[in-house]
Image: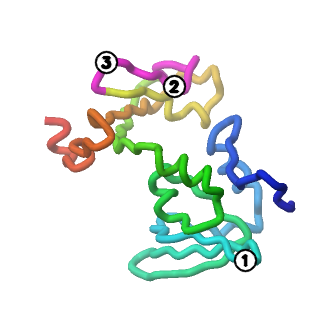
Amino acid sequence: AERKSGEDGVWTFRHGMSEMVWAIEKQRELQGRLKTGADVQSVSVNPDRTVELSYSQNGRSQKVKAYAVVLASPAPVTARIVKNGLSSQVMGALKRIKYVPYVTMGVFMKQRLFRNAWNISCLDTVFSSLNDAVRTQVDYEYSGKSVLGIAMPGSNAQDTTLVRQGREQLFT
């Protein structure tokens, strides 16, 4: 579709990024053509509206051309790799967002702990949130084995202590 004046190519989804995964799964022509585990260095929009993407994977640098690219990365990462193609307003917003690195853990449970919410925010605790990691994969009534996701942030956006520590240091 042709882009209208004022559109910036940025979208949100009612059910989160999982909607993208569901849509991609249905596209048989994409099977075997998706790349995962790549380290993207740059994304640029060409004058003909195609997108050029530079990435490395397994030590090899690659360049590909596409009609569209989906960026599902933290705002500061997106701001660093996008060279052009997003409006100055979007780029400004991406650059202003402070990214707080955090550690995530999955705790395997004998039964599902909660189901009325996907994510519970925790104030004044070492954890910032707890989430039902199987929610998108099971029926609402399911109460069997589950995975509880736990997010632990640093004390502020500059604190990378938890990210730099090894598993042994975190749990001793």
N-terminal-most mark, 3 or 1: 1
* Magenta-span inclusion, residue 119: yes
Q: Is residue 121 above or below residue 50?
A: above
Residue 144 badge: 2
Q: Is residue 52 toward the left or the right of residue 129 in the image?
A: right
Report, in whole angstroms, how far the alpha carbon at label 3 lies from the one at label 2.
30 Å
* Residue occupying the point 86% across, 62% down: 2
Within 10 Å of disc 1 (Cα), the crowding (few <14, some 14-19, many 20+) is few
Disc 1 is placed on an element classified as loop
Q: What amino acid type is highlighted by mark number 3? A: Asp
Disc on res. 124: 3
Picture coordinates of residue 152, whole percent (x, y): 32, 34
Q: How many marks?
A: 3
Stretch of the chain drawn in magenta: 112-126
The residue identified by callout 1 is 47
Identify the residue at horizontal 74%, vertical 72% (top origin).
49
- Position in image of residue 22 (x %, y %): 70, 48
Mark 3 to mark 1 CA distance (whole Å):
50 Å
**47 up-or-down from 21: above or below:** below
Inspect the image, locate mark 1, and give the three-letter code of the amino acid beneath it: Pro
State yes or no: residue 59 in magenta: no
Q: Secondary structure at mark 3?
A: loop
| Image location of residue 106, percent across then percent down | 38, 37
Crowding at dot 2, Cα within 10 Å, few <14 / some 14-19 / many 20+, comes out as: few
